[in-house]
Image: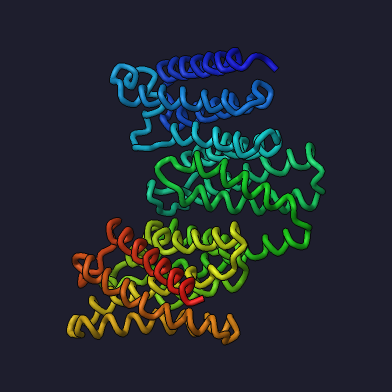
Amino acid sequence: MIAPWLGIGAVLAVLGVLFAVLKLFEQRTRPDPEVLRKLLHVGMGLTALSFPWLFHQHWPVLTLAAIAAVGLLGVRLIGALRSSVGSVLHGVGRESLGEFSFALGIALLWVLANGNVLFYIIPLLVLTFADAVAALVGVRYGTLRYATLDGTKSAEGSLAFFLTTFACVHVPLLLYSDVGRLESLLIAAIIGILVMLLEATTWFGLDNLTIPVVGFVLLKTFTGLQPNQLLGCLAVIVVLAGIAFYQRRRTTLDDDALLASVLFSYVFWVLGGVMWLVAPATLFIKDKLQSPVPAAQGASADDGRVHNVLAVLSVCLPGLAWSVAAVALDRPALFFPFTLTFAAHLAIFETTRLRHQRPAISHASALALATLTGWLLLFIPYILMERWTQTSLVESAIALPCIAVVAMLFSALQPGMNDCPRDTPRWLRQTSGAVLASALGAAGAALGA
């Protein structure tokens, strides 16, 4: 183990040489900008793989991440740097925070692993190679395209991502851990599918942050499970993916939104079990986030797929927060505000649809119908799942005015309701409404306890 400052200097020197070599390579061969960027990605990842043998404390890696962030910001903002070495990063012509996410992702992974070399190396191998291989395969061989917020990606690229992730997880687990052969195969398959879905639905370069962090969490979770448990986890994700594929032409979710819904559904199941799938599944079955705008005559099936991943994030993030809190705090009672978030979303969707499809209906009637729809479809099942206890009846009674208040607020604050808006501000308002409803409900339940 060398002195930390010598290690920091060595890493910075290697990164400087890497930029210089890639710049020379660019000048002499004029490669595809995506190839150049991914070569840098791989070089930075390989350099970070040396950290367990260079450092034994957190501060050197955090210092490197801070220095890298400052340097990358300079490359982005200083014209002379951007036009010289900056072309290695920014030649792809799309805005991204990928370089900053990369530095932050490695720093967080280092802290989370906390000296466990295998738990640091495996997610970093995935970050280093899977994303690069997927991008290069997609550019060269991608023909089956699907839409994302970052533009189109390819099924071939996603398959390459899965296979590379599978190898990056399976081989180290098999060779350098006590995990059994069957377990390592199953863990690699599950993590490969989940991280592939994560990469497909993440935009703006944030996958460089989410892949190592989520990869670490998944690795830590699944290495403690038995083969029968792992088989169950794999079966659930395969079933959810099959349902999503079957529904692809039957929903208004675009491709990355549909993949995100599979990922969120799996997380809800892992955190809470089957009961925690009822509310999101009910919303999906009832609404499928359907646009009330009828498809034009002669339009393709994809023309009606108008909801992107932001719509799914709007619906699922408040519920995810409650489900994570329920596990972290060991409080199953948080199932109530979790359910309430989806009831609020359902009421908002119903309000928007009624205002658009039935303009003659009064505002008060639309709100009343939407509120009752959200409450009945989610809190009758809630009462049944909670076995008709007095607590569940009281909570359901508390939920009704919470849903009504949020539906009224959204209707009052959202402009252009009759046009069924689907822009980012609308999803932010809807998410805020679901959070407010669940917070009011949780506070009311606590006071009534």
Task: Left or right? Give the position of 169 relative to 32.
Answer: right
Residue lying at 57% horizontally and 49% vertically, measured from the top left = 195
Q: Say which quadrant the N terminus sits in.
A: top right
Closer to the camera in the image, 280 or 184: 280
Which of the 4 image quarters holds residue 10?
top right
Q: Give the colour scheme of this rendering.
A: rainbow
Whether residue 221 sits left or right of residue 292 in the image: it is right
Image quarter of residue 313: bottom left
Q: Position of residue 20 (x, y in %)?
A: 46, 15
Q: Residue at x 38, y 47 (%)?
A: 151
Residue at position x 73%, y 40% in the image? 171
- Tell me: residue 209, above or below residue 28: below
On screen, 83 above or below 318? above
**In front of the other: 378 or 436:** 436
> Quarter of the image holding residue 42?
top right
Is any part of residue 288 visible from this angle? yes
Residue at 47 percent of width and 69 percent of height: 337
Residue 449 percent location from the top left of the image: 52, 76
